[in-house]
Image (tube, helix red, strand yellow):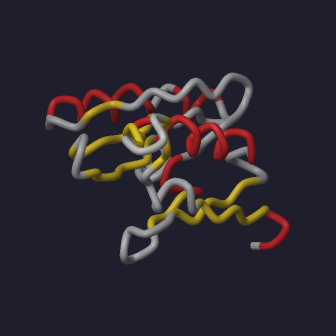
Amino acid sequence: MVFAANPVFVGFNDGIGKFVVPSRMVHASRQREVPFYVDWYRQRGFKIIEVDLGPDYLEGHGDLIWHPDGSRIYAGYGFRSTQGGVEKLSNAMCRYWERPNRESRSSQCISSTLTAITLIPASAR
């Protein structure tokens, strides 16, 4: 387990507290690492947010980084994470930031963070 940033994406939200999103690694040899990281974070009180990535990949902090003020996430995709994986992260996380809009009786994502994911294709890196 050399590249410790890739197996999870770590964050914090006032509503849910500390959380991690487990990765779906491209290479089988790396996939076996993820449960060990998830267990470590779970034992320390982090909420585990499972994202159904289907056939897509998402490699945690290897391709995702918070803006210093926490207002957005920059996401690279291409040779590890897929664009679909990043989009699924955004959609799944947005559910944790939804709350009813009392005036319109509809739900809205209140996360400026997760609705502002900036995608960066591998060809641009």
Q: Is residue 101 left or right of residue 91?
A: left
Q: Does 69 sit above or below residue 120?
A: below
Image x and y of residue 24, in percent = 58, 32
* Residue 64 sits in quarter: bottom right
Quadrant (top left/top right/bottom left/bottom right) for the N terminus: top left
- Seen as rendered, the residue at the extreme bottom is 68
Image x and y of residue 71, in percent = 43, 69
Image x and y of residue 17, in percent = 21, 45
Q: Is residue 8 left or right of residue 14?
A: right
Q: Residue at x 41, y 43 (%)?
A: 101
* Residue 15 sits in quarter: top left
- Seen as rendered, the residue at the extreme front is 103
Q: Nearer the viewer, residue 125 or 30?
A: 125
Q: Residue at x 55, y 29 (%)?
A: 31
Quadrant (top left/top right/bottom left/bottom right) for the C terminus: bottom right
Q: Is residue 46 left or right of residue 72?
A: left
